[in-house]
Amino acid sequence: PEYADWSTRKRAAWELLPSQTNAFYHKHLPPGEAKREGASMDEEEEAHFLRMLVEHRFAADGNWGLFSMYIRGRTGSTCKKLYRELEKAGAPAPGAFRSMQVDRAQRRREKAAAVAATRGLADENSGSDGDDEEEQPSCSQVERR
């Protein structure tokens, strides 16, 4: 379909694509891509879907629109729904998706630790005047023998 034939919402989402890519692909297919018929997946599509989940972990972070770019004919909302159905059916390898959630929590902890470490370094460096020379102790700080 031509741009002029798109709904107002799809055109608005398209205009915001550079800054809100996930939002566009969550509800819409790329231009010229045909919607895949049927709510369920065949065996081949399911295998591809599971492979993409492992390779592109950002789906675990809720970015189903971005994930759907790897699943032809499916929007992000459809991928999310298909994932929930697979999860309920127990189709994925045991722990595969749980480990993705654990990895997500681990990434958050690592990011928080990195931010804390960066702040700590900034605090340590804030008293420095920028010279690399060691500061000499004042007379009152020198211990007498």
Image (cartoon, rainbow, N blue to C red):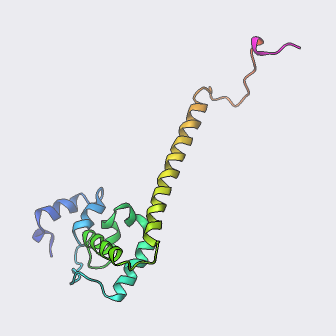
Indicate the position of residue 144 as horizontal and vertical percent values.
Answer: 85, 13
Would you say 74 lies left or right of 140 here?
Answer: left
Look at 75% across and 21% down and name the residue there.
Answer: 136
Q: Does residue 137 show up magenta in the picture?
A: no
Look at 57% across and 36% down and name the residue there.
Answer: 120
Residue 127, compared with residue 97, is above or below; it is above
For the question of whether residue 70 can be seen, the reply is no
Residue occupying the far bottom of the picture = 43
The quadrant of the image that shows the C terminus is top right
The quadrant of the image that shows the N terminus is bottom left
Query: Magenta residues?
Result: 140-145
Q: Nearer the viewer, residue 73 or 106?
A: 106
Indicate the position of residue 77 as horizontal and vertical percent values.
Answer: 25, 69
Q: How many numbered circles does the render carry?
A: 0
Indicate the position of residue 31 as horizontal and vertical percent values.
Answer: 22, 73
For the question of whether residue 23 can be seen, the reply is yes
The dominant secondary structure in magenta is: loop
Residue 116, compared with residue 97, is above or below; it is above
Q: Does residue 144 show up magenta in the picture?
A: yes
